[in-house]
Image (cartoon, helix red, strand yellow):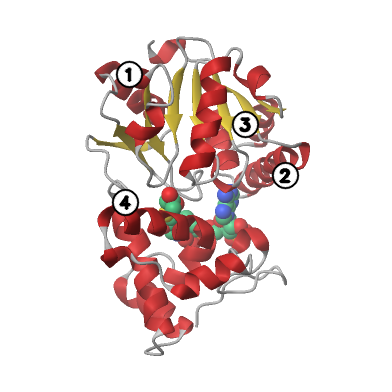
Amino acid sequence: MELDDINTITVLGAGNMGHGIAEVAALAGYEVHLRDINEEFVENGYDQIEWSLDKLAEKEQITEADAEDALGRVETYVDLAESVADADVVIEAVPERMDIKKDVYTELEAAAPEETVFATNTSSLSVTELAEVTERPERFCGMHFFNPPVRMQLVEVISGADTSAETMDLITDLAESMDKTPVRVMKDSPGFVANRILVPLMNEAAWIVESGDATVSEVDSTTKYGIGLPMGSFELADQVGIDVGYHVLEYMHEVLGDAYEPCPLLEEKVEAENLGKKTGKGFYDYEDGEGAQVP
Ligand code: 3HC
């Protein structure tokens, strides 16, 4: 398959990353099928796309006609088989757990046309292990976007052990057609490159606070104003989803060892379902609509 053959992209999972990826694909002119496991999730994802497109139009980053056209290219689905029936590429962005993703790939393999290419937006899990659930490991790779996808430039294109050169080229071209900067990662290791750096940063920030050596605002002020990242470490954790960072750490801890042990502070937030912006509360409170204020 060549880039010109791609018309329809199915995005599985309408959460933070899924709806953002669907928006980026629709803005690039693709027909997008956005699928989640129930109406509420998928409608919420669609509403988020609408909000984001309106915001981009309001700021004159796109025209109102572009926003309308992009939204018109997004169709929502709950039935997985229907959503992939004419998909050229499926981008999977379901929760960051190996068991959930494997179940989805088993169902997907049975439903998708044989030539459809599968790309996983996993943040850390083995692309090779996920591909093994399917009959098409050569047409399977990682396509890892960053949060929020519509604003972040990088897409890691990750090769599993059996990914073909054609698939890597196709997904690299696809990322470029979405105005992204793809970086090819040829070795499938936990967290790939970006999350191997970013997620331990969030974890270390949590360990500093857990040990009583500094406060959340001290840590965030130094990361933002001193180290020069666009957000404080805790702001970033709230943006990404504390659960996402936590699951990435759990996996890196399991595979790479003790250096990646998740801080209990993160676990407490996950157990309390204070996951960041998406639940209205994380390390900061977003319920008043103001969001994080780093002093
Ligand atoms: N769509 C449209 N508008 C959006 C938006 C979206 N998805 N998200 C935020 N905005 C809007 C805000 O509502 C705000 O609007 P307002 O000014 O009307 O209030 C505006 O964008 C803020 O944009 P600015 O350009 O003024 O703000 P910034 O310069 O701070 O940029 C940012 C925002 C691009 C998010 C920047 O803070 C940033 O780059 N943060 C770091 C994000 C990052 O590192 N992401 C990677 C995380 S790791 C990851 O995702 C991997 C995963 O696998 C774990």
- Give yes or no for contact between labels 1 and 2 (Cβ–Cβ under 8 Å): no
* Outermost residue toward the left in this view: 187
Mark 3 or mark 1: which comes first in sequence?
3
Q: Amino acid at mark 1?
A: Glu
The residue lying at 53 percent from left, 15 percent from top is 7
Q: Amino acid at mark 4?
A: Ala
**Discs 3/1, front:** 1
Q: Which residue is mark 3?
A: 66
The correct choice, above or below, for 292 with respect to 7 in the image is below
Nearer the camera: disc 4 or disc 1: 1
Q: How many marks?
A: 4
What residue is pinned by disc 1? 138
In primary-sequence order, the first of circles 4 and 2 is 2
Query: x, y percentage for residue 20?
Result: 56, 42
The kind of residue tagged 3 is Asp
Query: Which of the two discs, 1 and 2, labels the residue nearer the N terminus?
Result: 2
The answer to whether 54 is drawn above or below residue 139 in the figure is below
Q: Residues within 10 Å of mark 3 (few under 14, many from 20)?
A: some
Residue 225, percent across and down? 37, 76
Identify the residue under disc 4: 194
Circle nearer the viewer, 3 or 4: 4
